[in-house]
Image: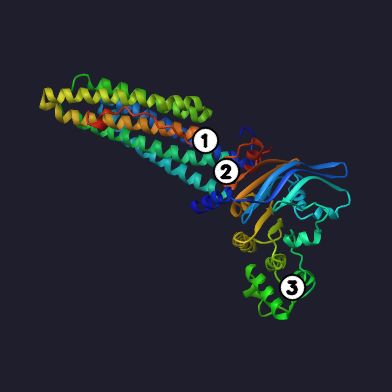
């Protein structure tokens, strides 16, 4: 895989597609961190920036898809090259969804601004967002370095994200039972936490693409789920 | 994709039509093929790929003893067709080649009529007794080669007057007229345009219901399109032999990967 193609334009096309994914990953990481900070500091201006910034992420996904379509049509990639194209497309899809979650988070920030503040909530969410963004950054790093070990580590970390989400969920339940005026903001905050947890799932999907790219096989073992909400707890 | 994979899975459990063990070939001092072991399944298309001089055509020519005609060629090892050694002293190479037919790179019809081209094999092997029987054999072969409708009104016209693609299908009709069990094809489409190539590929796909087809091709996309199993040869070695899907999505050997992805290997 390390040696160059005889047709060097093939290498340039593959590198260009991967560079676009990395740029997209950078935008998504920034959007998620900005959205979490805007929520924590009630910074409506920053939230607005995240909302409008999503269009650039969507445009990048389109560009990646047309670049991949071109590669498939003109170069007929096989083996590792084929898997590179397939993983680029799937990772772009995961990033696009993650970008949408960041945008949704920023939308809810504006609504939350009008409501009573729930003590401690935005800090916990920010910690969750940071952990998830780190997962995504590591997954993309593993992709660039073709690092299966790091990808496997990212997959395992999704368990911690699930546990953080579960404890936030329980905390919100307590707040809502204590005071019905908390129900409105807590519902919004819960959606925010759930959406961040889903970004963690997308980071896991990116990590799985790294494993597929390098080994040619999707990781088979089911990761244990620690989502207490799945059983109503 | 599903259909393709199902076809490949069927073949995985199928008996071997040809089994080669420890096959070595020398042309004079040149060691052209080294220790090849392979099982070629019945009623399937097996593709041999690899760079020029890798030994794939040499090995193909071992399968119907075409290398016997090369004075300097020396062959070791065993090649079994239905369990019988084709290099056994009691095997008549001419009879063997009726069972293992061959189609070459350049269409090479005899300078005879279309009819006589196809009738040639059945005549010399005495397969038919009456003209009516021979007519039937010729028609069946031309139909199987997907050429009948184009030539049925001019069977007496010279075979050399057909287009390149039609000539190649005529050669395939000629090869299958003797009812072979195995059909060897050495670069059968390299002299054809894309439409004629597609027609021959469609034909190969239909032929695998009845024959074991072994095709040598420089076009990796052609190997991917028509075969269920692919063997990659490099510097006289059989490097990797697996289902075609496996070879083209996730080959095990880095040399295979380098070759099929178009890298310097």
- The chain letter for the residue carrying disc 2 is B
A37 left or right of B115?
Answer: left
Nearest to viewer (mark 3 / mark 2): 3
Q: Secondary structure at mark 1?
A: helix
**Left or right: A219 with respect to B32?**
left
Q: Secondary structure at mark 3?
A: helix
State the image coordinates of residue B245 (x, y, percent, origin top left): 56, 46
Classify the position of the N terminus of chain A by image quarter. top right
Q: Is residue A31 left or right of residue B7?
A: left
Above or below residue A123? Residue B227 is below
Q: Residue A190 appears in which quarter of the rendering?
A: top left
| Residue at mark 2 | B246
Query: Is B133 in front, or is B33?
Result: B133
Residue wearing tag 3: B119
Describe residue B230's horizontal placement relative to residue A134 as left or right: right
Q: Which mark is residue A213?
A: 1
Return the x and y of residue B174 as percentages of the image width and height: 72, 68
Residue B6, position in %: x, y? 51, 51
């Amino acid at each position: 895989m390390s040696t160059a193609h005889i047709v060097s334009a093939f290498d340039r096309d593959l590198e260009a597609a991967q560079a676009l994914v990395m740029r997209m990953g950078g935008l998504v990481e920034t959007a998620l961190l900005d959205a979490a900070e805007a929520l924590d500091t009630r910074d409506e201006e920053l939230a607005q920036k995240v909302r409008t910034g999503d269009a650039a992420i969507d445009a990048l996904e389109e560009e990646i898809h047309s670049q991949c379509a071109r590669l498939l049509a003109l170069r007929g990639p096989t083996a590792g090259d084929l898997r590179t194209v397939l993983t680029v497309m799937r990772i772009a899809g995961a990033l696009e969804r993650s970008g949408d979650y960041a945008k949704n988070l920023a939308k809810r920030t504006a609504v939350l601004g009008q409501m009573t503040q729930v003590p401690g909530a935005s800090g916990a969410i920010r910690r969750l967002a940071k952990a998830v963004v780190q997962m995504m950054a590591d997954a993309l790093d593993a992709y660039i370095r073709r690092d299966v070990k790091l990808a496997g580590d990212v997959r395992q970390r999704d368990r911690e994200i699930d546990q953080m989400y579960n404890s936030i969920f329980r905390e919100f339940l307590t707040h809502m039972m204590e005071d019905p005026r908390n129900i409105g903001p807590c519902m919004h905050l819960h959606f925010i936490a759930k959406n961040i947890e889903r970004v963690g799932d997308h980071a896991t999907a990116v990590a799985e693409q790294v494993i597929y790219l390098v080994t040619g096989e999707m990781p088979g073992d089911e990761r244990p789920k620690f989502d207490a909400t799945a059983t109503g707890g | 994709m599903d259909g393709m994979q199902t076809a490949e899975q069927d073949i995985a459990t199928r008996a071997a039509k040809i089994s080669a063990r420890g096959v070595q070939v020398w042309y004079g001092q040149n060691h052209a093929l080294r220790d090849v072991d392979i099982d070629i399944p019945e009623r399937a298309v097996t593709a041999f790929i690899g760079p020029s001089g890798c030994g794939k055509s040499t090995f193909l020519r071992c399968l119907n003893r075409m290398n016997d005609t090369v004075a300097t060629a020396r062959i070791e090892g065993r090649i079994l067709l239905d369990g019988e050694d084709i290099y056994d002293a009691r095997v008549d190479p001419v009879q063997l080649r009726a069972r293992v037919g061959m189609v070459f790179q350049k269409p090479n019809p005899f300078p005879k009529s279309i009819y006589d081209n196809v009738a040639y094999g059945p005549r010399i092997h005495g397969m038919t007794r009456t003209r009516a029987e021979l007519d039937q054999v010729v028609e069946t072969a031309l139909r199987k080669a997907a050429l009948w409708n184009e030539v049925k009104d001019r069977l007496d016209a010279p075979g050399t007057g057909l287009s390149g693609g039609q000539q190649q299908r005529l050669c395939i009709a000629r090869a299958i007229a003797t009812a072979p069990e195995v059909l060897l094809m050495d670069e059968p489409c390299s002299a054809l345009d894309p439409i004629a190539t597609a027609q021959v590929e469609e034909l190969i796909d239909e032929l695998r219901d009845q024959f074991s087809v072994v095709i040598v091709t420089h076009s990796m996309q052609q190997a991917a399109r028509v075969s269920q199993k692919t063997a990659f040869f490099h510097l006289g070695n059989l490097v990797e032999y697996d289902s075609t899907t496996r070879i083209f999505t996730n080959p095990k050997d880095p040399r295979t990967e380098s070759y099929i992805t178009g890298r310097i290997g």
